[in-house]
Image: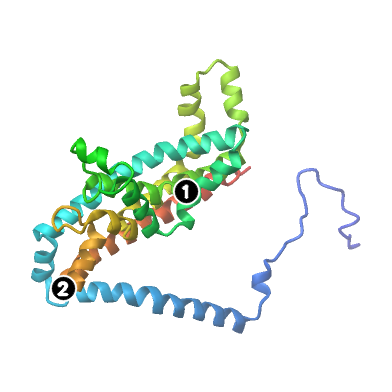
Amino acid sequence: MTALTSAALPASPTRRFEPVITPAATLEPLWVRVILVTLAFAFLTLFLFVPLAAVFAEALKKGWEVYLKAVIEPDALSAIRLTLITAAIAVPLNLVFGVAAAWTIAKFEFRGKSILLTLIDLPFSVSPVISGLIYVLLFGAQGWFGEWLRAHDIKILFAVPGIVLATIFVTFPFIARELIPLMQAQGSEEEEAALVLGASGWQTFWRVTLPNIKWGLLYGVILCNARAMGEFGAVSVVSGHIRGETNTMPLQVEILYNEYNFTAAFAVASLLTLLALLTLALKSTVEWRTNESRQPPHE
């Protein structure tokens, strides 16, 4: 029986022979991969796992009874409540701003577009302490609007409004910066098609744009919420550190630690850590869903 080479076989219209491309990383020697993975895990263990374990170990050092007592203490409950209220106000406002800014930058061409992008990135480059001082300059007793606010009995600094404003300032880039590249990559063809077919602007947004950006939007909201609950620098400047009134959870941890009340400090810190771990889990889930949604459908 004569052996036939692959060249003599008739070409099949349904079958394609494609070269198998091996990732370059798998071509590295085994010992190189082992060393790199070991170094990565050692770094994570030293700078992530051990500190996280230390927080919970110190919080529970004197038992669950002391831990729960520190968590339900009135000042701690006030700090938890204020942190949640601040995030509940700041995140939705940043969501509206982020979607509007991303829509404007991704869908339209106008003068000053690069300036707007730079301004959106401003909180990333400005120290949070400076952000807080900006509001002191504006709304402080000797600030630009201080006399008018005092005359109308309006209190912004050392009160909830100042904390919310400072939190909004340091967190507003997160949603916008997540959506802008996503919406630019998607283009505007689908929106234009919807408008041609007679859809209104709101119908186009709710039925075309929003479904396309939902996972990126949720990802930005998660990051924004995490930063809002954990913000320290800007909030510290504008809060006044009034116990039971203007202390958020990070500020409460600082006060308790400075008073050498380590168990209570680590108890409140453990709540922040749990929130961070929950945020990480949500972030990983959203990243997985986002990558899955971007995969081309299987034939």
Q: In the picture shown, does residue 299 fall above or below 122?
A: above
**Gap in Å between the C-alphas at discs 2 and 1?**
45 Å
From the viewer's side, name the closer residue of 156 and 186.
Answer: 156
Q: Is residue 60 visible?
A: no
Q: Is residue 188 shown to the viewer in this render?
A: yes
Rendering coords of residue 100 (x, y %): 47, 34
Local secondary structure at mark 1: helix
Expressed as whole percent of the image width and height from the top left, the position of residue 187 reads 62, 35
- In terms of image quadrants, where is residue 105? top right
Horizontal and vertical percent position of residue 138:
34, 46
Which amino acid does the dot numbered 1 rest on? Arg
Q: Name the residue tied to disc 2.
A: 259
Displayed quadrant of residue 260: bottom left
Q: Going by the image, does 203 lie left or right of 255?
A: right
Residue drawn at the location 51% of the way across and 46% of the way down = 119
Q: Give the mark nearer the N terminus: 2 vs 1.
A: 2
Relative vertical location of residue 159 with respect to residue 71 in this rendering, above or below: above
276 sits left or right of 84 in the view: right
Q: For mark 1, what is the residue?
A: 289
Q: Residue at x 61, y 23 (%)?
A: 193
Q: Find numbered disc 2 in the image and state the secondary structure of the residue it sits on.
A: loop
**Residue in the image at 49% along x and 76% along y:** 40
Q: Quarter-wise, where is residue 279 in the image?
A: bottom left
Question: Which numbered disc covers residue 174?
Answer: none
Indicate whether 87 appears above or below 268: above
Q: The C terminus appears in which quarter of the rendering? A: top right
| Mark 1 neighbour density, 10 Å: few (under 14) some (14–19) many (20 or more) | few
- 14 and 130: which is toward the camera: 130
- Residue in view at x 33 percent, y 60 percent: 233
Amino acid at pointer 2: Glu
Give the quarter of the figure containing the N terminus.
Answer: bottom right
